[in-house]
Image: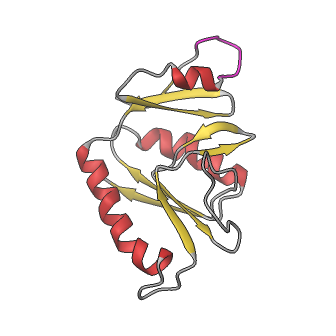
Amino acid sequence: MSSLPAASHPGMPATFLDLERVPEGYKGEIIAGVLYTQPRPRPAHQDALGTLFGDIDGPFRRGKGGPGGWWILVEPGIAHPEAAESSPDMAGWRRERTAQLPPGPVEVVPDWICESLSPSNRRYDLLVKKRFYAKIGVQHLRRDGA
Protein backbone atom coordinates (compact mmCIF):
# COMPACT_ATOMS: atom_id res chain seq x y z
CA MET A 1 0.00 0.00 0.00
CA SER A 2 1.37 3.41 -0.85
CA SER A 3 1.46 6.48 1.34
CA LEU A 4 -1.68 8.47 0.89
CA PRO A 5 -2.82 11.84 2.11
CA ALA A 6 -5.73 11.34 4.49
CA ALA A 7 -7.87 14.29 5.48
CA SER A 8 -10.38 14.10 8.30
CA HIS A 9 -11.44 17.71 7.67
CA PRO A 10 -10.97 18.54 3.97
CA GLY A 11 -9.48 22.00 3.50
CA MET A 12 -8.28 22.20 7.13
CA PRO A 13 -4.70 21.44 8.26
CA ALA A 14 -4.26 18.11 9.99
CA THR A 15 -3.61 18.13 13.75
CA PHE A 16 -2.12 15.87 16.44
CA LEU A 17 -5.67 14.61 17.05
CA ASP A 18 -5.67 13.31 13.46
CA LEU A 19 -2.40 11.48 14.21
CA GLU A 20 -3.99 9.87 17.27
CA ARG A 21 -6.82 8.59 15.08
CA VAL A 22 -4.52 6.72 12.67
CA PRO A 23 -5.57 3.05 12.84
CA GLU A 24 -3.39 0.47 14.59
CA GLY A 25 -0.88 -1.03 12.19
CA TYR A 26 -0.40 2.29 10.37
CA LYS A 27 1.82 5.27 10.98
CA GLY A 28 0.98 8.86 10.26
CA GLU A 29 2.99 11.98 9.52
CA ILE A 30 1.80 15.54 9.09
CA ILE A 31 3.77 17.53 6.53
CA ALA A 32 2.66 21.01 5.44
CA GLY A 33 -0.71 20.45 7.12
CA VAL A 34 -1.42 17.17 5.29
CA LEU A 35 -1.76 13.87 7.15
CA TYR A 36 -0.04 11.01 5.29
CA THR A 37 -0.64 7.43 6.39
CA GLN A 38 1.08 4.20 5.50
CA PRO A 39 1.33 0.68 6.91
CA ARG A 40 3.87 0.17 9.68
CA PRO A 41 7.22 -1.08 8.34
CA ARG A 42 7.45 -4.79 7.61
CA PRO A 43 10.17 -7.11 8.96
CA ALA A 44 12.46 -6.81 5.88
CA HIS A 45 12.36 -3.01 6.16
CA GLN A 46 13.08 -3.14 9.90
CA ASP A 47 15.90 -5.64 9.34
CA ALA A 48 17.54 -3.32 6.79
CA LEU A 49 17.28 -0.38 9.21
CA GLY A 50 18.64 -2.46 12.08
CA THR A 51 21.62 -3.54 10.00
CA LEU A 52 22.35 0.03 8.90
CA PHE A 53 21.97 1.31 12.48
CA GLY A 54 24.43 -1.36 13.65
CA ASP A 55 26.92 -0.26 11.01
CA ILE A 56 26.82 3.45 11.87
CA ASP A 57 26.09 3.49 15.61
CA GLY A 58 29.59 2.48 16.72
CA PRO A 59 31.59 4.91 14.58
CA PHE A 60 29.25 7.89 14.63
CA ARG A 61 27.49 7.75 17.99
CA ARG A 62 30.05 5.97 20.15
CA GLY A 63 33.26 6.90 18.31
CA LYS A 64 34.41 3.30 17.76
CA GLY A 65 36.44 3.48 14.55
CA GLY A 66 34.88 6.78 13.54
CA PRO A 67 34.37 10.41 14.54
CA GLY A 68 31.74 9.94 17.27
CA GLY A 69 29.80 12.94 18.50
CA TRP A 70 26.43 12.12 16.92
CA TRP A 71 22.99 11.11 18.14
CA ILE A 72 21.62 8.45 15.76
CA LEU A 73 17.94 7.51 16.16
CA VAL A 74 15.67 5.05 14.37
CA GLU A 75 12.23 6.47 13.47
CA PRO A 76 12.46 9.55 15.70
CA GLY A 77 9.54 11.93 15.98
CA ILE A 78 10.62 15.30 14.59
CA ALA A 79 8.48 18.38 15.22
CA HIS A 80 8.83 21.41 12.97
CA PRO A 81 6.61 24.41 12.15
CA GLU A 82 6.19 22.95 8.62
CA ALA A 83 5.14 19.56 10.00
CA ALA A 84 3.32 18.74 13.19
CA GLU A 85 5.42 15.58 13.27
CA SER A 86 7.42 13.55 10.80
CA SER A 87 9.34 10.35 11.31
CA PRO A 88 12.25 9.50 9.02
CA ASP A 89 13.56 5.95 9.06
CA MET A 90 16.77 7.15 10.72
CA ALA A 91 18.18 10.55 11.63
CA GLY A 92 21.35 11.98 13.12
CA TRP A 93 22.27 15.16 14.97
CA ARG A 94 25.74 16.42 15.79
CA ARG A 95 25.99 16.64 19.57
CA GLU A 96 27.57 20.08 19.25
CA ARG A 97 24.13 21.25 18.04
CA THR A 98 21.98 19.01 20.25
CA ALA A 99 23.67 18.42 23.59
CA GLN A 100 20.99 16.03 24.86
CA LEU A 101 17.98 14.24 23.52
CA PRO A 102 14.59 15.70 24.45
CA PRO A 103 11.90 13.56 26.11
CA GLY A 104 9.41 14.22 23.28
CA PRO A 105 9.65 15.00 19.57
CA VAL A 106 12.97 16.51 18.52
CA GLU A 107 12.56 20.15 17.48
CA VAL A 108 16.07 20.58 16.06
CA VAL A 109 16.41 19.90 12.32
CA PRO A 110 18.54 16.76 11.83
CA ASP A 111 21.97 17.09 10.23
CA TRP A 112 21.47 13.76 8.46
CA ILE A 113 18.46 11.66 7.46
CA CYS A 114 18.24 8.20 5.94
CA GLU A 115 15.12 6.85 4.27
CA SER A 116 14.95 3.21 3.24
CA LEU A 117 13.09 3.12 -0.07
CA SER A 118 10.79 0.14 -0.28
CA PRO A 119 8.17 -0.38 -3.00
CA SER A 120 5.34 0.79 -0.73
CA ASN A 121 6.94 4.11 0.30
CA ARG A 122 9.40 4.99 -2.47
CA ARG A 123 7.16 7.55 -4.21
CA TYR A 124 6.16 9.25 -0.94
CA ASP A 125 9.76 9.41 0.33
CA LEU A 126 11.07 10.83 -2.95
CA LEU A 127 8.26 13.26 -3.77
CA VAL A 128 6.98 14.45 -0.39
CA LYS A 129 9.58 13.82 2.28
CA LYS A 130 12.68 14.65 0.21
CA ARG A 131 11.23 18.10 -0.61
CA PHE A 132 10.24 18.62 3.02
CA TYR A 133 13.74 17.74 4.27
CA ALA A 134 15.32 20.16 1.80
CA LYS A 135 12.87 22.91 2.79
CA ILE A 136 13.63 22.62 6.52
CA GLY A 137 17.40 22.58 5.94
CA VAL A 138 18.54 18.96 6.36
CA GLN A 139 22.10 18.99 5.04
CA HIS A 140 22.51 15.30 4.17
CA LEU A 141 19.92 12.81 2.90
CA ARG A 142 20.73 9.18 2.23
CA ARG A 143 18.34 6.95 0.34
CA ASP A 144 18.74 3.17 0.35
CA GLY A 145 16.68 0.66 -1.59
CA ALA A 146 14.99 -1.97 0.54
Residue placed at 47% from the left, 78% from the top? Answer: 62
Quadrant in which the N terminus appears: top left
Q: Nearer the viewer, residue 138 or 98?
A: 98
In this view, the residue farthest toward the front is 103
Q: Position of residue 22 (x, y in %)?
A: 47, 22
> In the shown orientation, is residue 62 left or right of residue 39?
right
Q: Nearer the viewer, residue 60 or 12?
A: 60
Q: Give the vertical position of 42 relative to 30 (above or below).
A: below
Q: Position of residue 50 (x, y in %)?
A: 32, 59
Q: How is the image coloured?
A: secondary structure
Q: Give the vertical position of 138 relative to 4 (above or below).
A: below
In this view, the residue farthest toward the right is 81
In this view, the residue farthest toward the bottom is 65
Which residues make up the magenta segment? Answer: 8-14
> In the shown orientation, is residue 104 left or right of residue 142?
right
Q: Give the vertical position of 27 relative to 63 (above or below).
A: above
Residue placed at 57% from the left, 78% from the top? Answer: 69
> In the shown orientation, is residue 71 left or right of residue 145?
right
The dominant secondary structure in magenta is: loop
Number of callouts in the render? 0
Residue 141 position by quadrant: bottom right
Question: Does the stretch in magenta take in 10?
Answer: yes
Residue placed at 55% from the left, 42% from the top? Answer: 127
Q: Give the vertical position of 64 relative to 124 (above or below).
A: below
Q: Position of residue 82 (x, y in %)?
A: 72, 39
> In the shown orientation, is residue 31 left or right of residue 67?
right
Q: Position of residue 25 (x, y in %)?
A: 34, 28
Residue 49 position by quadrant: bottom left
Question: Does the stretch in magenta take in 4?
Answer: no
Residue 110 position by quadrant: bottom right
Q: Nearer the viewer, residue 93 or 103?
A: 103
